[in-house]
Image (cartoon, rainbow, N blue to C red):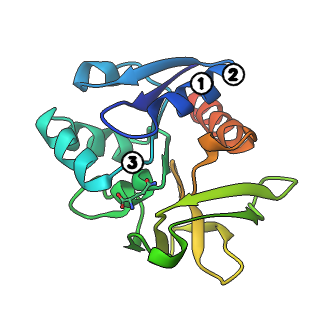
């Protein structure tokens, strides 16, 4: 099982470490050739505008979009959620995203979130986090904040969280994603 971590900007090494701790091979993805033979890809948090520019510069935007459309499992966290939702970026999840949606007064906070598929509340770490204002009919909502904002969701092969699972001690979101990659592999 080889899972890539998009390594252009942002919280790359934390995802790399967590995936390695889960026992999978990790490929840092900096260019198109790094996308070959991946069983899945993590798009980390960081600054979505910067990552989008760097994706375009590395000629990866359309290649990645096609791979996602073709069914490659992806997990997007924070800025990754933004990129996967925006029409002019990766457009893999049908929804309206509100960037920095929790406002300046609470730039960072932690909240225990009930996530569909997990048997315990997940310690969500939110850093200038987005949320999903609306989602399309094909999107399964996996989690909401206490004030009812959508902060975890899945549409087929695309899973997103507005929080940073790689910064917590709990690897269960990554394990959920790895299971998805394994299942996808079995089907192909
Ligand atoms: N606010 C950032 C953006 O929209 C995301 C923040 C993060 O990934 N921690 O790019």
Kindly indicate the quadrant of the structure image that contains residue 94: bottom left
Contact? badges 2 and 1 (CB < 8 Å): yes
Say which of 167 and 30 sits in front: 167
Cα gap from disc 3 to disc 2, whole angstroms: 22 Å
Residue closest to the eye, 107 or 161: 107
Residue drawn where x is 54% and y is 73% of the image: 106
Residue 25 place in picture, x, y as percent: 56, 15
Secondary element type, mark 2? helix
Which numbered disc flags the more N-terminal residue, 3 or 1?
1
Q: Is residue 135 visible?
A: no
- Residue 46 appears left or right of 13: left
Residue 21 is tagged as 2
Which quadrant of the picture is home to ligand 1?
A: bottom left
Question: CB of mark 3 within 8 Å of CB of mark 2?
Answer: no
| Residue at image mark 1 | 17
Circle 3 packing at 10 Å, graded few (<14), some (14-19), many (20+), is: some
Check mark 3 vs ligand 1: CB closer than 8 Å? yes or no: yes
Give me the C-alpha separation between circle 3 and circle 1.
17 Å
| Vertical position of residue 36 compared to residue 122: above or below | above
How many residues crowd mark 2 within 10 Å: few (<14), some (14–19), many (20+)? few
For mark 3, what is the residue? Answer: 46
Pointer 3 with pointer 1, Cβ within 8 A: no
């Amino acid at each position: 099982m080889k899972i890539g971590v998009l390594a252009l900007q942002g919280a790359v090494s934390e995802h790399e470490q967590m995936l390695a701790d889960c026992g999978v091979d990790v490929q840092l993805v900096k260019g198109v050739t790094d996308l070959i033979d991946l069983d899945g890809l993590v798009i980390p948090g960081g600054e979505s505008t910067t990552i989008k520019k760097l994706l375009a510069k590395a000629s990866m935007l359309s290649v990645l979009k096609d791979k996602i459309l073709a069914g490659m499992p992806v997990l997007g966290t924070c800025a990754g959620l933004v990129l996967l939702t925006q029409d002019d970026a990766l457009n893999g999840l049908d929804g309206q995203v509100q960037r920095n949606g929790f406002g300046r007064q609470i730039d960072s906070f932690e909240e225990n979130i009930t996530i569909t598929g997990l048997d315990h509340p997940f310690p969500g770490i939110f850093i200038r986090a987005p949320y999903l204002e609306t989602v399309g009919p094909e999107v399964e909502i996996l989690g909401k904040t206490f004030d009812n904002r959508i902060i975890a969701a899945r549409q087929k092969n695309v899973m997103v969280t507005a929080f940073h699972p790689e910064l917590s001690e709990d690897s269960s979101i990554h394990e959920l994603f790895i299971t998805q990659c394994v299942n996808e592999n079995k089907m192909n």
